[in-house]
């Protein structure tokens, strides 16, 4: 179980590394990278940075190699911005979570029927409410003089509360 301190450091490393990749890293291999999350060891000496890369397998491998070669630069940025006794050694891991979720969505789209194709002949709920007259609708406007009388009677009645002895 991660300690609060490790979780705090992981979030700080994620923030520093992601902003350094976005604004300061000049390596042309490293593009379209998102730092998804960071795992820090219990002794705070190692950090595993999970990244998601847009593109095909070749592009992802190339970006991962670029990040590994820039690990020293990114580690120096972490040392500069985060005050700890030891700067965690960074390793980069490709996060396949986004890829898996896209694949699951694609499979579900193939398996499940499309709602538009099933209801082609039926009008939508919005069309029904616009075109169909509402014959069951009653006039909801109350008699204002009767309401005023009831309010006046209710406010003029004295409230009876039993008194405690």
Image (spheres, helix red, strand yellow):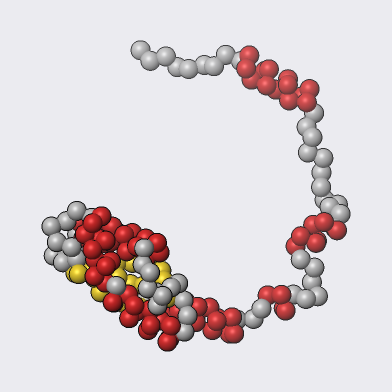
**Which residue is located at x 41 percent, y 69 percent?**
34
Q: Is residue 156 left or right of residue 47?
A: right
User: Where residue 119 sits in the image (x, y, percent)?
Assistant: 74, 75
What residue sits 47% from the left and 84% below the top?
56
Q: What residue is drawn where x is 16% and y is 66%?
A: 45
Give x and y (percent) for residue 6: 21, 60
Q: Position of residue 121 (x, y in %)?
A: 81, 75
Q: Does residue 14 appear in the picture of this structure? A: no
Q: Is residue 79 above or below residue 28?
A: above
Residue 72 can be seen, yes or no = yes
User: Is 96 above or below relative to 141?
Assistant: below
Nearer to us in this view, 102 or 88: 88
Quadrant in the picture for residue 44: bottom left
Return the residue found at the far bottom.
58
Quarter of the picture holding the C terminus: top left
- Apparent side of residue 7 relative to residue 106 in the rendered image (left or right): left
- Relative to residue 96, is residue 142 drawn left or right? right
Dividing the picture into quadrants, the one containing residue 64 is: bottom left
Q: How many marks?
A: 0
Q: Position of residue 53 (x, y in %)?
A: 42, 76
């Amino acid at each position: 179980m991660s300690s609060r301190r490790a979780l705090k450091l992981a979030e700080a490393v994620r923030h520093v590394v992601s902003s350094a990749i976005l604004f300061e890293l000049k390596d042309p291999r490293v593009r379209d990278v998102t730092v998804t999350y960071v795992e820090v060891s219990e002794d705070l000496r190692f950090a595993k940075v999970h990244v998601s890369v847009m593109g095909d397998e070749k592009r992802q491998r190339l970006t991962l190699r670029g990040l590994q070669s820039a690990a020293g630069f990114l580690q120096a940025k972490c040392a500069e911005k985060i005050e700890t006794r030891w700067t965690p050694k960074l390793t980069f891991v490709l996060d396949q979570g986004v890829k898996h979720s896209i694949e699951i969505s694609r499979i579900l789209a193939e398996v499940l029927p499309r709602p538009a194709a099933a209801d082609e002949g039926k009008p939508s709920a919005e069309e029904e409410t616009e075109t169909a007259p509402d014959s069951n609708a009653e006039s909801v406007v109350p008699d204002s003089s009767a309401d005023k009388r009831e309010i006046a009677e209710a406010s003029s009645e004295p409230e009876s509360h039993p008194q405690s002895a």
